[in-house]
Amino acid sequence: MSTVFKFVLATLTAVFMALNGCGGGGGSTVAGIGGTGKIASGTITGFGSIIVNDIKYDIDSASLEVNDDDSAGLSQDDLRIGMVVTVTAVVFDDDTGVASLVVYDNEIEGPVSGLTDPGNGLTKSFSVLGIDVIVDSADTEFDDSDASGFSFATIADGDVVEISGFFDGSNVLNATYIEKTDDFDLGNSEVEFKGTADAGTDAGAGDSFTLDGSITVDIRADADLSEVPGERVTGSMFVEVEGTLTNDNPLTIEAFRIELEEEDLDDDAGETELEGFVSDFIDNSNFKVDGQLVDATNAEFIPAGLVLSDDDKVEVEGTIAGGILNASKIELED
């Protein structure tokens, strides 16, 4: 999602100019003139165009990016319920908005292993490339758009899956959307992984390095490194690696593309809505939601008297300045 925030100011400006230029010619958003520029990160819960964090966004004129694909022709049909997206938009008092940019980027793609079914019909757990994952029969959207029958009941070890969701305080990925993309074939199945290059890394095409101290990445000689500064991966750099899994013990990826990733929202993103789990909680003035540092000293809490703690799932509204989301409202989610 590194391209999201490169164009935030430009896209917001374009939307404001478009709205200010609206006349009485029957445009569907004329009534919303006077809205506020905002960035929203959350789960798609409905369509028409899309609903994120209870706001209905018109995306007819928006630029779309889906898993790093920003080609012309992408539309609402390329999005799904449960996908976690970042929306750059103008939002109005009637809980509607006009989006200029919508970005979806999955959290991980790889083979299911170690599937555990407690038999309660509610949750199942497994790992993907060493990341622990939980799926929920009620809250995880299983994509069966190809009529393959993929579902909570049928998910199995060896399914190659694409997952969107939120990491909790224990770094467990709580899936909101999951799609089966392949049956695992070692050396051929494509995978995607986001992680931090180990200290001391300095790797380019043809080199190898380690992610998160556990995954070896062999960079192909013809790999696309154009989205990495200097086309070299260096220590502590947070990157997304795309490639094929050539060894599952130890995990080894042969990378054909590496991209620099943004871990947090822009340090001065302005008005922001954010969905995710509370982590690193110290007190109301110092904690994180979905990795973003939050100060809720002056926030309205819903329900009133809410006492926050790690692993609470919340929706936060406020303004990001200097890298801190100064919350005006925090609402506990189910």
Image (cartoon, rainbow, N blue to C red):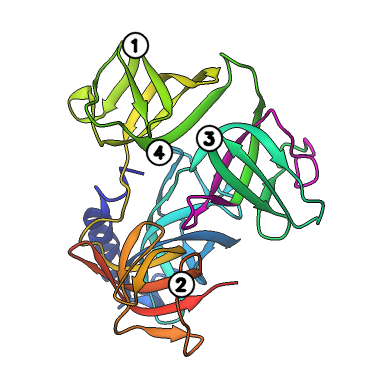
Q: Which mark is residue 222?
A: 1
Q: Which mark is residue 70?
A: 4
SS category of the residue bearing label 1 = strand
x and y percentages locating residue 10 in the rendered image: 22, 54
Name the residue located 39 percent from the left edge and 80 percent from the top edge. Answer: 329
Q: Quadrant of the N terminus?
A: top left
Identify the residue position indicated by label 3 in the image: 130
First along the sequence among labels 1 and 2: 1
Q: CA distance from mark 3 to mark 2?
A: 26 Å
x and y percentages locating residue 240 in the rendered image: 38, 34
x and y percentages locating residue 301 in the rendered image: 43, 84
Identify the residue position indicated by label 2 in the image: 309
x and y percentages locating residue 12 in the rendered image: 27, 60
Closest to the observer: 238 or 79? 238
Q: Tell me the kind of residue under disc 1.
A: Asp
Q: CA distance from mark 3 to mark 4?
A: 29 Å
SS category of the residue bearing label 3 = loop
Please give the range of residues in magenta.
148-175
Q: Is residue 196 above or below residue 300?
A: above
Observer-side mark, 3 or 4, equals 3
Q: CA distance from mark 3 to mark 1?
A: 27 Å
Q: CA distance from mark 1 to mark 2?
A: 47 Å
